[in-house]
Amino acid sequence: MSSRPFLPRLKRAGAISALAVLGLLLSGCRSWLDGFQSTLSVDGPVARSQRALFYTTCYVTFAIFLVVGGVLAYATIRFKDRGRAGAEPPPQSHGNPLVEIGLILASVLLLVIIAVPTLRAIWFAYDIPVAARGRSYEIVATGYQWWWKFEYPNAPVKLAPTGEMPLATANELVIPAGRPVHIELRTADVIHSFWVPKLAGKVDMIPNRANHIWLQADQPGYFYGQCAQFCGDSHAVMRFRVIALNEKEFAAWLAQQTQPARSLSAPAVAAPPPAPPHVIQTSFKQNQFGFGPEWASDAPIPQLDLWRAQQSPDRDEDSTLIARGRALFQAKTCISCHAVRGQEGMGIIGPDLTHIGARTTVAAGLLENTPEQLARWIGHPDRVKPGNKMYTTGYVPNHVALDPDEITALVAYLRSLK
């Protein structure tokens, strides 16, 4: 039985399937183009330069595809063996100097079309343009397994009795909008890669090697970043946020961040306070992350507004519970790894927690900074982020064990640090 009648049907089925797949892909294009980490929907000059280079490369390669594909289709159709018995083959030839030289010149021209904007984009992305350097703001970013430290050399904080050090925050990089930001990139352990897709391309952070990047947010906004270089078990959840503020709001944020940790006075008690009437749920389910509205495409409140709301103290603060949490923060040896300026913590191994309550995320951008998610992180850091040092060098060697009441008190204390 001949297979010839079957082949046309097979080709038609393949074409229909290809069109169906193409339709599905195109239906999701919007989320790809303007998603949280889109490189096509950008908000800064560096990212725009890189997007323009990407488009140029796409246009050139698409033109090559059309020409080569067109010639191939013409040759396939024009010289197809249609089963005619005794048909003579077409005239054969070998070598044509004009065609060969023309192809070489066309190839060189296409390479120049790609190379010139590529070099221009590389030079532009390498350093801040000369005309804008006087307005740039300096920040130092350091990558750890698996979190980010951001230091502000131009915003020193006072240390007793007469010392000072640069302001340090963790996992949320706050920058002035409409102004170039020069970021020195460092790593404390392995190779990491700093990447904020909507603002600039990725740049590696290599041990014992200085590197830098510059970026600029055109207007105030909330942007998503992450490590783009495999750096260990929890590389995929090494995230951070970039918050761009207008100059006035940025100055107010700096002034607040350079202040010591917020303290609440609690009524004196002769014995430990009783357990609170409501204990935060700390149960854990594998692969369940509470991203909530910040990862939803139809978030009812803009993320920048949510960040602004996070700067204010919670309305239902319990000073007694906060005082108990502060005592537990000392008793459970948290102060040996974390700094809380103006209070007991002076550790440098983990993130600075002086104003952790004002951040929108915890666990390096993995979880929302809500009471439930913060409790989950404190109760199960090894399950939320496998291999993290909070668990391996803190909980395990110090035999840290927390019951639900203690977790609730610690959450209340940390959220009070605005």
Image (cartoon, rainbow, N blue to C red):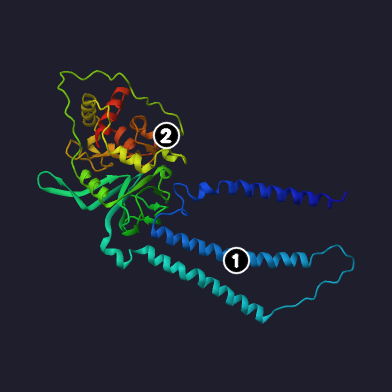
Q: Is residue 218 above or below residue 95?
A: above
Which is in the foreground here, disc 2 or disc 1?
1
Of label 2 and label 1, which has the lower sequence position?
1
Q: Which mark is residue 221?
A: none
**Is residue 267 found left or right of 111 in the rendered image?**
left
Residue 347 in percent (x, y) is at 22, 40
Q: Quadrant of residue 90?
A: bottom right
Q: Which residue is mark 2?
A: 290
Three-letter code for the amino acid on which mark 1 is drawn:
Ala
Number of numbered discs overlaid on the protein picture: 2
Residue 192 in percent (x, y) is at 38, 51
Q: Which residue is mark 1?
A: 63
**Is residue 411 found left or right of 238 in the rendered image?**
left
| Pick the front one: 190 or 186 | 186
Q: Quadrant of residue 70?
A: bottom right
Residue 330 in percent (x, y) is at 21, 31
| Quarter of the figure that contains the C terminus | top left
| Pick the front one: 154 or 325 | 154
Residue in the image at 36% along x and 64% along y? 126
Whether residue 411 is visible here, answered yes or no, is: yes
| Pick the front one: 404 or 177 | 177
Give the spatial CA distance, label 2 vs label 1.
Answer: 45 Å
Q: Is residue 114 above or below residue 156?
A: below
Three-letter code for the amino acid on which mark 2 is drawn:
Gly
Q: Is residue 176 above or below residue 82?
A: above
Q: Secondary structure at mark 2?
A: loop
Whether residue 291 is visible here, answered yes or no, is: no
Q: Secondary structure at mark 1?
A: helix
Residue in the image at 28% along x and 36% along y? 357
| Pick the front one: 27 or 387 | 27
Residue in the image at 36% along x and 55% along y? 218
Residue 355 in percent (x, y) is at 25, 39
